[in-house]
Amino acid sequence: MKIFTNDGLRRICDRTVEKEGIQKLDLIERAASAVSYELISRWRTSKRFVFFAGPGDNGADALAVARMMYEQGYRPEVYLFNIRSAQLSPCCLVNRDRLLQTAGENIDFIEVIQNFSPPELNKGDVVVDGLFGNGLRSPLRGGYTALVQYINSSDAYVVSIDVPSGMFGEWNMGNDRRNIIRANLTLTYQSKRLAFYFAENAECVGECKVLDLDLDSESLARTPSDFYLIERDDVHDVMRPRNPFSNKYDNGTVLLVAGSYGMMGAAVLSARAALRTGAGLVTVHAPRCGYQVLQTAVPEALFEPDLNEIVTSKIDLHRTHSVVALGPGMGCNDETLDAIHEFIMNFKRPCLLDADALNCISRRPQLLKSIPMRSIITPHAIEFDRLFGDHSTDEERLKKALDVSKLYKITIVLKGHYTMTVRPDSKIYVNSSGNAGMATPGSGDVLTGVISALIAQNYSADWSVVLGVYLHGLAGDLAAQEHGTYGMVAGDIINHLGKAIMSVMK
């Protein structure tokens, strides 16, 4: 599903108005009806509602919602900000007059033109934020920042219409979060904005519910976007059933270079995950100390011993594999670092680099430019910062990942609550599956095995990553149903991979 930008969504709304032969006011009525229904379904008429409406179309939405709620027996208090007198948008002006004509003196309505004394907000109150929506072009300033900070300091429950006022839909670098509404609930239109998926914005967005405005389907399909949310239907459309006449060689071969003394568990997890995701043959290259561990824990996998007893010291490919993945549990000792250096300098096909392979590269950053094109790297936030410098927010990392992916022509999987896959063509795929229980040791090793297995089965590299991330998260969701988010371990994710694949192929 596309994640639309603010500009893209405005264009879709304009086309909807044009194609349906309606007015913009009619679309605002449609949006207000959806918001009103949501508020009415959550709170009784006895609840105190305080509306803050801005001078633009977001304010028009809020005024229309206040009118509809009044008609249902609520008594909202409304503050309309018209600081530059007579600067209300045409839709806001019409909805102000409609509200006054409908409610008259039966509601508290104040049009703020210059001086403003804010109402007292208490814990049981509901504040409806309709100050600024997707039309905001610059950070809030002046009296609006004071109002936002006043609302944020209150104990009231805050509902934002469309986006929390002060927030931009995509990029908020340089935007002071003290001047963004901290909503408990955001009722957004048609799709979540990209900014809603960044951890640093979570306290501003709160719970988010998407309201379908029944916008023009052709415009939704044709409006371009570089951002996509990957959901079950997307994966279902790409996954293919097994050929009943296939043999194990048809399902590809995976070479995992993983493990070291004391960290063979990572190799076990990756190998088991690759097998559970359907790889035909899985070979693990590991130090000799891992032989008994691997042959006991994963008897279905082949073991290829390194020359060294406790670390990987040389990566020789004795045969051609469908995919080679390096990193889980390898450690960062000098011999392993040299082995990875030699491999990257000489290997010419795309590969997958994770965990300690990335940590080794961070110690020799000149290796970045030698990573084979179309390779995949799968860093979590700390590994990403080791490679590309310190970043304080998810947004900063994504911006950097866009630049780096394009520069080196590699795919970057930014692991997190909403794992984001960044491609060299600047497309961003946001994953919708997964849960907090997956923040557990070995979860990333499992993902390496899953993605490797899909590549081995001849899914395109781009889709292997997106599919793998989703299936990994879905298996985690199934595991959480059985064990809860506190009780999950990485092995539980592996044990539910088969069910995850079955569920999306139904």
Image (spheres, rainbow, N blue to C red):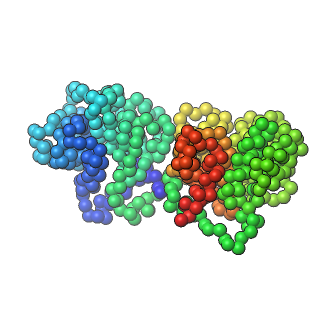
Position of residue 59 measured from the top left corner of the image (x, y, whole percent): 26, 42
The residue drawn where x is 43% and y is 47% is 193
Position of residue 111 measured from the top left corner of the image (x, y, whole percent): 18, 35
Q: Quadrant of residue 70?
A: top left
Q: Nearer the viewer, residue 17 or 419?
A: 419
Residue 232 shown left or right of residue 390 in the figure: left
The residue drawn where x is 38% and y is 31% is 179
Q: Nearer the viewer, residue 93 or 420?
A: 420
Instruction: Please indicate, yes or no, whether residue 248 appears anywhere in the rendered image.
Output: yes
The residue drawn where x is 64% and y is 52% is 495
Q: Is residue 456 above or below residue 162?
A: below
Residue 320 shown left or right of residue 233 in the figure: right
Residue 257 shown left or right of residue 157 in the figure: right
Q: Is residue 392 above or below residue 2?
A: above
Instruction: Please indicate, yes or no, whether residue 411 appears anywhere in the rendered image.
Output: no
Q: Is residue 254 above or below residue 342?
A: below
